[in-house]
Image (cartoon, rainbow, N blue to C red):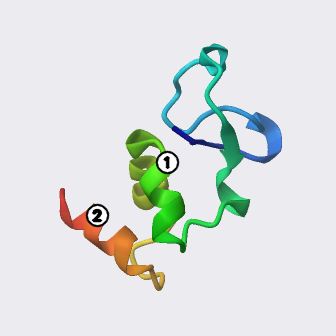
Amino acid sequence: MMHLTETGYHAGRRLCLTSRDDGEPNAHAAYAPLNRAEFRATACPGCLRVWATEAYDDDDEMPEWVQAERAKD
Protein backbone atom coordinates (compact mmCIF):
# COMPACT_ATOMS: atom_id res chain seq x y z
CA MET A 1 0.00 0.00 0.00
CA MET A 2 1.34 3.44 -0.94
CA HIS A 3 1.16 6.06 1.78
CA LEU A 4 0.92 9.77 1.04
CA THR A 5 3.30 12.09 2.84
CA GLU A 6 3.56 15.78 3.55
CA THR A 7 6.06 18.17 2.01
CA GLY A 8 7.69 21.20 3.58
CA TYR A 9 8.31 21.46 7.32
CA HIS A 10 6.77 18.05 8.02
CA ALA A 11 8.18 16.39 4.90
CA GLY A 12 7.88 12.64 5.03
CA ARG A 13 5.15 12.46 7.66
CA ARG A 14 2.34 10.23 6.47
CA LEU A 15 -1.06 11.84 6.15
CA CYS A 16 -2.62 8.93 8.05
CA LEU A 17 0.03 9.42 10.79
CA THR A 18 1.11 5.76 10.83
CA SER A 19 4.76 4.95 11.45
CA ARG A 20 7.12 4.82 8.50
CA ASP A 21 8.85 1.82 10.11
CA ASP A 22 6.55 -0.70 8.39
CA GLY A 23 8.52 -0.78 5.15
CA GLU A 24 5.56 0.27 2.99
CA PRO A 25 6.27 2.78 0.20
CA ASN A 26 5.56 6.50 0.46
CA ALA A 27 4.94 9.30 -2.02
CA HIS A 28 4.67 13.04 -1.47
CA ALA A 29 0.93 13.73 -1.76
CA ALA A 30 1.43 17.01 -3.62
CA TYR A 31 3.35 15.21 -6.39
CA ALA A 32 1.51 11.89 -6.45
CA PRO A 33 -0.64 11.08 -9.51
CA LEU A 34 -3.89 11.23 -7.55
CA ASN A 35 -5.81 11.93 -10.74
CA ARG A 36 -5.17 8.30 -11.77
CA ALA A 37 -7.66 5.77 -10.39
CA GLU A 38 -5.00 3.05 -10.74
CA PHE A 39 -2.73 4.93 -8.34
CA ARG A 40 -5.52 5.65 -5.86
CA ALA A 41 -6.41 1.94 -5.86
CA THR A 42 -2.96 1.20 -4.40
CA ALA A 43 -2.95 4.11 -1.94
CA CYS A 44 -3.73 4.05 1.76
CA PRO A 45 -7.44 4.82 2.28
CA GLY A 46 -6.61 6.84 5.40
CA CYS A 47 -4.12 9.00 3.51
CA LEU A 48 -6.61 9.54 0.68
CA ARG A 49 -9.30 10.52 3.17
CA VAL A 50 -7.05 13.13 4.78
CA TRP A 51 -6.08 14.53 1.38
CA ALA A 52 -9.71 14.72 0.23
CA THR A 53 -10.90 16.47 3.38
CA GLU A 54 -7.93 18.76 4.03
CA ALA A 55 -6.29 19.69 0.71
CA TYR A 56 -9.19 21.69 -0.70
CA ASP A 57 -11.25 24.61 0.52
CA ASP A 58 -15.02 24.21 0.18
CA ASP A 59 -15.18 26.67 -2.74
CA ASP A 60 -12.29 25.08 -4.70
CA GLU A 61 -12.78 23.03 -7.83
CA MET A 62 -12.31 19.42 -6.78
CA PRO A 63 -11.83 16.17 -8.66
CA GLU A 64 -14.83 13.86 -8.66
CA TRP A 65 -13.11 11.34 -6.36
CA VAL A 66 -12.54 14.09 -3.78
CA GLN A 67 -16.17 15.17 -3.99
CA ALA A 68 -17.28 11.56 -3.52
CA GLU A 69 -15.01 11.12 -0.51
CA ARG A 70 -16.31 14.32 1.06
CA ALA A 71 -19.90 13.24 0.43
CA LYS A 72 -19.34 10.35 2.85
CA ASP A 73 -19.51 12.78 5.78
Local packing at callout 1 (Cα closer than 10 Å; few below 14, some 14-19, many 20+) is some
Does residue 33 lie above or below 63 as drawn? above
Q: Earlier in the sequence, mark 1 or mark 2?
A: 1
Please, what is the three-letter code of the amino acid marked with disc 2?
Arg
Kindly identify which residue carries mark 1.
Answer: 43
Closest to the camera, between mark 1 and mark 2, is 1
Q: Residue at x 52, y 23 (%)?
A: 18
Where is residue 26 shown, x and y percent of the image?
67, 39
Please, what is the three-letter code of the amino acid marked with disc 1?
Ala
- In this view, the residue in front, 65 or 15, is 65
Circle 1: element type = loop
Kindly identify which residue carries mark 2.
Answer: 70
Where is residue 25 shown, x and y percent of the image?
66, 35
Does residue 68 lie above or below 28 as drawn? below
Where is residue 22 shown, x and y percent of the image?
60, 16
Local packing at callout 2 (Cα closer than 10 Å; few below 14, some 14-19, many 20+) is few
Outermost top residue: 21
Location of residue 29 by image quarter: bottom right
Q: Are marks 1 and 2 in contact (CB under 8 Å)?
A: no
Q: Residue at x 44, y 79 (%)?
A: 63
> How many dots with numbers?
2
- In this view, the residue in front, 50 or 25, is 25
Where is residue 39 shown, x and y percent of the image?
54, 60
Give the side of residue 23 with respect to residue 34, left or right: right
